[in-house]
Image (cartoon, helix red, strand yellow):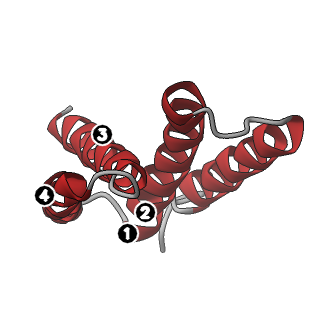
Amino acid sequence: MRKWMLLGAAIASEVAATLSLRAMQDHGAWLAAVVVGYACAFTMLTLVLREGVPVGVTYGIWGACGTALTAVLAALVFGDPFTWPIVAGIGLIIVGVLFVEFGSRPTGPTP
């Protein structure tokens, strides 16, 4: 359970940092939130990897969830476009992550 909470924290930190990066275009003071957010995200990712989650699974979930949340929140907060092709792209990313997740599990008894 701890590893998934750490991964959730990494995703939240990365999304906050990315949205802060967007906000920084108008107000340079957001730079601190960008730096702290990305530092926290990578620290949490390191802890997730130390918990034994494979790097492909960790990065795939982090990237997919981060992309989806950032697209949705940027549309809500900043009025960025959120079109059907964006929704389809997010869906494809999620499917790809599922393939990586299921592909990283052993399929049968090892000799």
Q: Nearer the viewer, mark 4 or mark 3?
A: 4
**x, y (%) of residue 93?**
69, 52
**x, y (%) of residue 97?**
61, 53
Q: Which residue is nearer to you in this view: 96 or 87? A: 87
Measure the C-alpha gap from mark 2 to mark 4. Answer: 24 Å
Q: Nearer the viewer, mark 2 or mark 3?
A: 3
Kind of residue at disc 2: Tyr
Asked whether the residues under the numbered discs 2 and 4 touch, taking CB atoms below 8 Å apart as contact, a structural biologist would say no
Quarter in which the N terminus is drawn:
top left
Q: If you read the primary sequence from the N terminus, does the residue marked by circle 3 or circle 1 appear first?
A: 3
Measure the C-alpha gap from mark 1 to mark 2. Answer: 6 Å
Q: Which residue is nearer to you in this view: 84 or 103? A: 84
Location of residue 46 with respect to 8 vertically, above or below: below
Q: If you read the primary sequence from the N terminus, does the residue marked by circle 2 or circle 3 appear first?
A: 3
Name the residue located 46 percent from the left edge and 67 percent from the top edge: 56
Kind of residue at disc 1: Val
Please state if 97 lies on the left or on the right of 81 as rendered: left
| Local SS, label 4 | helix
**Residue under pointer 1:** 55
Q: Which mark is residue 98?
A: none
Measure the C-alpha gap from mark 3 to mark 1. Answer: 18 Å
Name the residue located 23 percent from the left edge and 61 percent from the top edge: 38
Q: Nearer the viewer, mark 1 or mark 2?
A: 2
